[in-house]
Image: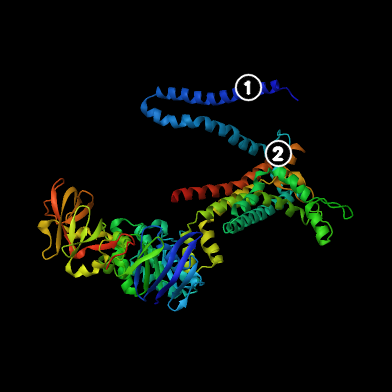
Amino acid sequence: MVPLSTYIGQILTMLLAILVGVGGIVALYVVMDLLIRLLPDKAQQRIRPWVYLGPLLFILTFYLVYPTLNTVYLSFLDKHSERFVGLDNYIFTVTNPAMRVAFRNNLLWLVLLTTFSVGLGLIIAVLANRVRYETVAKSIIFLPLAISFVGASVIWRFVYAFKPAEVPQIGLLNATLVSLLGAEPVGWLVNKATNNFALIAVGVWLQTGFCMVVLSAAIKSIPTEIIEAARVDGANGWQIFWRVIVPMISSTIAVVATTVIINALKAFDIVFVLTNGNRGTEVLANRMYKEMFHFRDFGRASAIAVILLLAIIPVMAANIRRFQEQEAIR
Amino acid sequence: MASVTYEHVTKRFGDVVAVNDLDIRIEDKEFLVFVGPSGCGKTTSLRLLAGLEEITEGNIYIGDRLVNDVPPKDRDIAMVFQSYALYPHMSVYENMAFGLKLRKTPKKEIRRRVQEAARILGIEDLLDRKPKQLSGGQRQRVAVGRAIVREPHVFLMDEPLSNLDAKLRVQARAEISKLHQRLGTTFVYVTHDQVEAMTMGTRIAVMNAGVLQQIDTPQNLYDYPTNLFVAGFIGSPAMNFFDATLVERDGQVRVETKDFLIPIPENRQETYRPHLGKEVILGIRPEDVHDPEYAPPGIQQARVKARVTVTELMGNEVIVYLETDHHEFLGRFDPRTGARVGSAIDATMDLDRMHIFDRQTELAIR
């Protein structure tokens, strides 16, 4: 047992940090406000917003804008960030065979993860809306969201576990296959035909809950009278779903889909833990990590980072625009 | 075009009886209004007819067809909802065309019917707009339009005017009445507003606590309420009630309250004689309580000494709040009245128009 006294010191330091941090910010604003008051009225009004936004802008610039720009800069330099190499790093990213696999897989993630997470989420949300044990059903689907990507990957490593045919199978999937169906065990994570899908399935398992919860809330916000009006108008369940419910929650679907798309582009943890990108399962984020920390190639890693950034920008822009449109309608 | 029949219809939600043994026949082309306070079962009755709720007991027929197990879409009805329930993602045109599209009506026919309905309702210029861009009154018209393009056998309307402001409501009331005459279709209309019921219905069904109280024409309902609830619900300001007893004085049946004793007209003597000694409730509408100076000539009157506590000048009349030692009541006086707050007055009641209810059963004694 570590004596309590060692913690007390840490706790005190922590409290002090909170006090100084929060107190410092408050003091900063108070002092700056006092200074502004010394100025003439007109100037006060013009300057005050900038002073209040200042610290935030500074932090954003320092921790977000500067690193981004620096990454772009590094992507044009060589391995050790010493020599300008022009587009060499980018040429590498599109010509290297491993990189091509990563591009292909990211596309696969993008399409499959989004389709299945959003699709399943929507189906479950609609179905759950009609049953009495809705809360229980939704809780179970939602639970995986609380697990970290790494934790989930460890869990699924057991589900996918593969032993040679003569040894007892400890993986849930293979045990089911062998004992119930009498089939040969499958190397889910080794077999090139299945491994990418196996990885994406973990992502779907993690993301469906999120999609379901958000979509379910949107579905519940549709007034019952509208559904009833559609019933009286002559729509059957299928038509109500496609022609009334889906269009009415389309903006929510778009928001959920873009969130999942961004997660698909950022796919890293699951791949890193389960296969580390081996046997044709490489993705861009994992490749970037390897270039950076295994091969110590800052140039190439930065180039991949820039490509990921560029891929995400349009999605973000669409999301923000949609959000603004919605705000405008309100 | 079809009649509607509720045959001993009961609807329970768990232990709660929402509609209790409702038995009505609504004739073809009739404008029937369900009216009653909130929670009286009027909306549930309508939803049972629409097929949005399942019947617990009994049968509903549209025309001769038993529709208990027929889904809403096959009942040949159209409904206007309280919130209008327009599809927010569709234009006005699409909203009105939706039901027809689902029924695979030819495009040309859809266009014709939507434009015809839009013309009737004066919303031709709004066809390309989304519901969000419309005012409350316009939305209400679209909701009505969506119902009429379907050319259904029965129109159902669930408080369609309750979200409109007072002025628009009066206007829309007249428009719906006109629409009913023009289309010649059966209308079933739900409202909590007795003025709407009185002005629009060819017959009114008054409901309370899931039970039908009385169904009759507006005038009959007003003049001959069958029980205390209908008497108090229909009419504004509400009917005055006095706890009273039927007594005999000098060989005549009379009504005695704690504060006054009034005679009963000759033609009703024999009706009430069997009930002598019974505890009753005397009901008299405010418009049948007059200023003695301005009481209409030729009425059988009884005068009751009362004090004036409040007067409300309405322009065409004065609502006068009166009190005797044990009772408070209202009179609708001629605006020339001399009644002033604090003054005493001989309130003059029109005896021909009084109502007597059994205090136990609350039914009218006739």
Does residue B95 show up? no
Inter-mark Cα distance, 1 to 2: 43 Å
Depth check: A236 or B123 in front?
A: A236
Residue A242 percent location from the top left of the image: 55, 63
- What residue appears at the point 55 percent right and 47 percent down from the top-left corner? A317
Q: Amino acid at mark 2?
A: Gly
Subunit that carries the residue with mark 1: A
- What residue appears at the point 64 percent right and 39 percent down from the top-left corner? A72
Depth check: A104 or B72 in front?
A: B72
Q: Quadrant for the C terminus of chain B, please.
A: bottom left
Q: Is residue B187 left or right of residue B348?
A: right
- Which residue extends farthest right? A166
Q: Amino acid at mark 1?
A: Leu
- Pointer 1: what residue? A12
Depth check: B325 or A105 in front?
A: B325
Give the total number of marks visible in the rendering.
2
Q: Is residue B196 left or right of residue A312?
A: left
* Residue A299 numbered tag: 2
Residue A266 percent location from the top left of the image: 66, 45
